[in-house]
Image: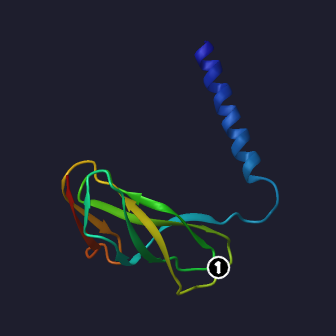
Amino acid sequence: MKTLKFKFLALLVAIVTIVGCSMGDDQPSCFTQAYAPTTAVTGPETTTVNVPITFNVSFSIGNSCGVFNRFAETVSFPKTVIATADYTGCSCNPVTAVTTKPYVFTAPTAGTYVLNFATTNADTPIVKTITVTQ
C-alpha cells in the first residue's frame, strides 16, 4: 500500500511540475540542440602517449540563435566527433559565418587512431589519422 501511495504522490508531483513549467507567460519557449556540420579540421598527425594534441575544428552554426555547446564523440574507434550547438530563440536569422573551436585529443596507448569529424554529408566525414608513439 505504501508503494501505491508513493507512486501516486510521485505522479502528482510530476504533473504539477510539468503544468507549472508550461504555464506562465504566453510566450513560446524555443530551444533545441543540434549538430553543427564540420567544414575544416587542422592539427598534428603525430603525438606521444598521454600528450594532448589540439585540432582546430571549423563548423557552421547556421543561424543567429545558435551558440557552440561542446563536441560530442563516440567511445570506440574510429571515433566520430560532432560539434553541437544550442539554439535559443524563436526568431532567428540565417548566418553563413564559420566558427572555429579547439578539440583536444589524448591517446592512452601507442597506435594509430582515426577521428571522423561529421560534415553535412554523413557518408563523407573529414578524417584525421593520428599516429601515437611511446
Give the image location of residue 113, x and y in percent.
22, 60
Give the image location of residue 89, x and y in percent.
67, 71
**Pointer 1 local density, CA inside 10 Å: few below 14, some 14–19, many at least 20:** few
Q: What residue occupies the far bottom of the structure in this picture?
A: 96
Which residue does the numbered mark 1 point to in the structure image?
Answer: 92
**Tag 1's secondary structure?**
loop
- Give 99 or 2, whichever is nearer the viewer: 99
Using the image, determine if residue 8 lies above or below residue 94: above
Using the image, determine if residue 21 lies above or below residue 87: above
Say which amino acid is labelled 1.
Answer: Cys
User: Which quadrant holds the N terminus?
Assistant: top right
Give the image location of residue 101, x and y in percent.
48, 70
Give the image location of residue 5, x and y in percent.
65, 19
Question: What residue appears at the point 68 percent right and 26 percent down from the top-left corner?
Answer: 9
Q: Indicate how the structure is coloured in the image.
A: rainbow
Q: What residue occupies the far top of the structure in this picture?
A: 1
- Give 9 or 122, whichever is nearer the viewer: 122
The quarter holding residue 65 reads bottom right
Position of 51 compared to 31: left or right? Answer: left
- Give 51 or 66, whichever is nearer the viewer: 51
Question: What residue appears at the point 22 percent right and 48 percent down from the top-left corner?
Answer: 109
Q: What residue occupies the far right of the structure in this picture?
A: 25
